[in-house]
Image (cartoon, rainbow, N blue to C red):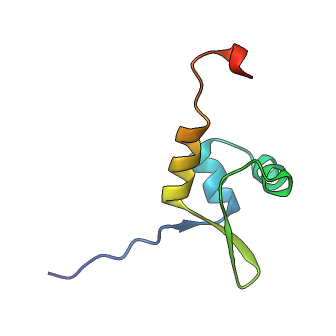
Amino acid sequence: MEEVYQNPFSNVREAGAFLRLKKHTLDNMRWMGTGPNFRKHGGLVYYHIDELKEWSLETRAKSTSQY
């Protein structure tokens, strides 16, 4: 049986869509150091799907007063 390869890396627009954030928001969060971990491949920014999920779980809150 042939294994199907799925790329675990997303570009900024794809990562934003996954997190339901605008590209500009992710760009700003990356600049401020508050967003998910990222890496550069050939000068382009990519996010690993596992790190997007991890970041989302780490930023969850139980009430709006936590902010």
Image side of residue 41 versus residue 7, left or right: right
As displayed, is residue 28 above or below residue 4?
above
Relative depth, front residue between 34 and 27? 34
Q: Residue 33: x, y in percent?
A: 79, 53
As displayed, is residue 66 above or below residue 49?
above
Counting the numbered discs, the total is 0
Q: Residue 41: x, y in percent?
A: 67, 81
Q: Residue drawn at (65%, 59%), measured in percent from left and top?
A: 37
As displayed, is residue 29 above or below residue 66?
below
Extreme residue toward the left, this view: 1
Q: Residue drawn at (48%, 57%), measured in percent from left and top?
A: 50
Task: Quadrant for the C terminus, please.
Answer: top right
Q: Residue drawn at (62%, 55%), measured in percent from left and top?
A: 15
Extreme residue toward the bottom, this view: 42
Q: Residue 1: x, y in percent?
A: 14, 81
Q: Residue drawn at (63%, 41%), measured in percent from left and top?
A: 20
Q: Residue 58: x, y in percent?
A: 57, 40
Image side of residue 48 versus residue 2, left or right: right
Image side of residue 49 versus residue 44, left or right: left
- The image quadrant that residue 66 belongs to is top right
